[in-house]
Amino acid sequence: MLRVLVQYLLTLVGKKAMTSLTPGKIAPTFQLGTTTGKALSLREALGKGPVLVAFFKASCPTCQYIFPYLERIHQQLREHGVQVWGVAQDSAQEATRFAKTYGLTFPILIDDHPYKTSRDYALQYVPSLFLVKSDSRIEISSEGFCKADLLAIQKSLAQPLSAKPPALFLPSEKIPEYKPG
């Protein structure tokens, strides 16, 4: 509901809301190298189950805010085969430093300049998240930090596994509903 309101308000002030790929569209396939030098293929990964693809830049404050929550999702559901990938628009060195700073244990892929994969996904902002289901369709896409979207992603990933992950947000945390990227 809040997301719809934000998009409506952005339209009123003449800005485009959510111009990247939307739910229901086929996710472009890609193969990128990771910070460890391994190449990962989205097509191959989808053969094992859904993939949450999260595009970011290390210098982005909203990316710095959201990625620890993506790590929580990864930790909660990785034993069930859930895959979370970060896709950096940075050098491998910067992306490695980012992953270390924020305690990320999921793979970090590098989308080097001229950012072909980011362009294929029609990114306008980072962070941009895409939950890609096994049939290659985007189920959820999100820009910036959106609490409702993160909860929907966690639920969508856990539900078919009959997994019962712990709360994504702790009662002691003051979490905004939305934070633009």
Image (cartoon, grey):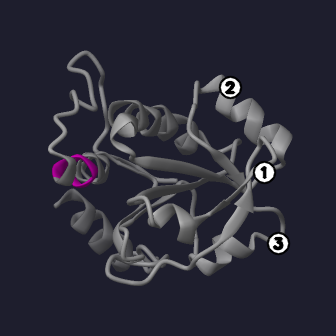
Residue on which the image places disc 2: 100
Give how far across and how far down residue 105 sits, in percent.
57, 31
User: Which of the two discs, 2 and 1, sits closer to the camera?
Assistant: 2
Q: CA distance from mark 2 to mark 1?
A: 14 Å
Residue bounds of the magenta highlight:
155-159
Q: Is residue 164 left or right of residue 57?
A: left
Question: Along the horizontal axis of the image, is 125 left or right of 175?
Answer: right
Residue 127 vertical placement versus 60 (above, below) = below
N-terminal of the pair, mark 3 or mark 2, is 2
Residue 101 x %, y %? 66, 24
Q: Residue at x 39, y 45 (%)?
A: 81
Mark 2, Cα crowd under 10 Å, few <14 / some 14-19 / many 20+, is few
Q: How far is the residue under mark 1 from the one under mark 3? A: 11 Å
Residue 38 position in % (x across, y down): 76, 50
Q: Residues within 10 Å of mark 1 (few under 14, many from 20)?
A: many
- Mark 3 is on which residue type? Pro
| Of callouts 1 and 3, the N-terminal one | 1
Disc 1 marks which amino acid? Asp
